[in-house]
Each structure stands twice: as C-alpha cells, then as structure tokens.
Image (spheres, helix red, strand yellow):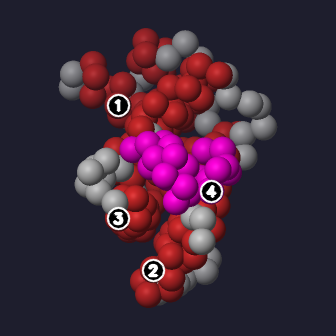
Amino acid sequence: MAPNNKRQDILQAAVTILGRDGFKGLSIQKLATEANVATGTVYLYFKDKDKVIVEVRLWLAKQFSDIIQAGVSSEQPLYERYHTMCENIWNMGQCHLTLLQTQIQYESLPTPLSVEVHNMEKKMFDQLIGLFNEGRESGEIKNLSDIVLYCLSLDSCFALTRKHCQNIEPIDYATYQLAIQASWDAITVK
C-alpha cells in the first residue's frame, strides 16, 4: 500500500469513528485498529489526536466542497447553481451518509476553529461564495453575511437530508424540492 493510501485510510477511519462514536470515541489506538494499521503508522502521519481532528476537518471540507459544487458553473443562473448544490446534498445523503454524520460532530465541537483553518475551508467553497457574492451584487440575494445565508439555505438542506437518511424524519423527494424552494425564498429579495 502506498503511503498516501495509508494516510487516506487513516483519515477515512477517523471519519467513520467520528461519525459513529463522536470525538470522545476517537483515540489513536482505535484509529489504528479501524484503519488496519499499526499505532506507530498513525503517528508517522499525525502528531496527535488534535492534528487528526484538524486534518479530518479539512479533508471533510474538501469532500463536501467537491460533492456539493459538482456540476455547478458560474455561467449558470443563480437559482440553477443553488438548486444543483441542494440536489448534490440530497444525493450525498444517499451515497455518503458517514460524511453527513461526521459533520454533526464538527458542528458540536466546543472549541472555535483557527482563522487559518476557517479561511482554508472557505476557499474550498468558491462556487457557493461566488453565488452569494454575485447574488448580493445583483440585488437578487439578501445583503447578509455568508454564514447567515448558508444557515438559511444549504444548512437546512443538510439537516433535512441527514434526518431523512437516518430515518429520524423521512421525507419524500417532492417535499425536499419544496424545501429547496423555501430555502431559496429565505435568502432572496422578493
């Protein structure tokens, strides 16, 4: 197995553990067992548990950004881009539930992110940030901060998808489409 594959295996194992057991359930020993590598191998790639958590966060952000922004182009009308991102979230729930479950753990992390990590994550979501910026400039989207727009829009799609895929509150696809429209209405100027 190539070194990059071992690193990826360790990151994927961390995603699995965090999604299943939360932060308290993550240990280097448990990570090594889940990744099917020696404990020393984990330490070759990661200094400690905190470094694993930061790296997983960035790895997850990259996974999310690639999935959510797939098929989105700045040439498309704003709503078409937005709808595509919402559809990608729904599809993520069908194929990548572990990613969604791990996201919940990061949202509940009590310590704030470093500015550097936050800025690195934000750069990964260039299509989403571009949509918000273009919409504010054209007057189609409300003049609210990126985080407020995100919470009123895509965050609700994440929540619905997670709840549906975990059988907490199943919804049908038609209802999800209505929710997409409602979330778009929440951020646009009427």
Q: How many other residues sit within 10 Å of disc 2, few (<14), some (14-19) or many (≥20)?
A: some
Residue in the picture at 29% in, 57% down: 76
Q: How many other residues sit within 10 Å of disc 3, few (<14), some (14-19) or many (≥20)?
A: few
Residue of label 2: 177
- Circles 3 and 1, Cβ within 8 Å, touching? The answer is no
Mark 3 to mark 2 CA distance (whole Å): 13 Å
Residue lying at the far left of the rendered structure: 1
Q: Please state if 65 lies on the left or on the right of 189 as rendered.
A: left
Which labelled disc corresponds to residue 80? 3
Q: Quadrant of residue 30?
A: top right
Mark 2 to mark 4 CA distance (whole Å): 21 Å
Q: Find the magenta span and give its range.
A: 127-150
Mark 2 to mark 1 CA distance (whole Å): 35 Å
Mark 4 to mark 1 CA distance (whole Å): 39 Å
Q: Examine the structure image and report whether residue 136 is included in the region drawn in magenta.
A: yes
Q: Please state if 81 lies on the left or on the right of 179 as rendered.
A: left
Q: Secondary structure at mark 3?
A: helix
- Going from N to C along the chain, the mark reached first, 2 or 4, is 4
Q: Please state if 49 lies on the left or on the right of 99 as rendered.
A: right
- Going from N to C along the chain, the mark reached first, 2 or 1, is 1
- Going from N to C along the chain, the mark reached first, 3 or 1, is 1
Residue of label 4: 142
Q: From the viewer's perspective, is the residue at label 3 or at label 2 nearer? A: 3
Q: Mark 3 belongs to which amino acid?
A: Glu
Q: Examine the structure image and report whether residue 47 is included in the region drawn in magenta.
A: no
On the image, the x and y values in percent for residue 136 come to 55, 49
Which labelled disc corresponds to residue 8? 1
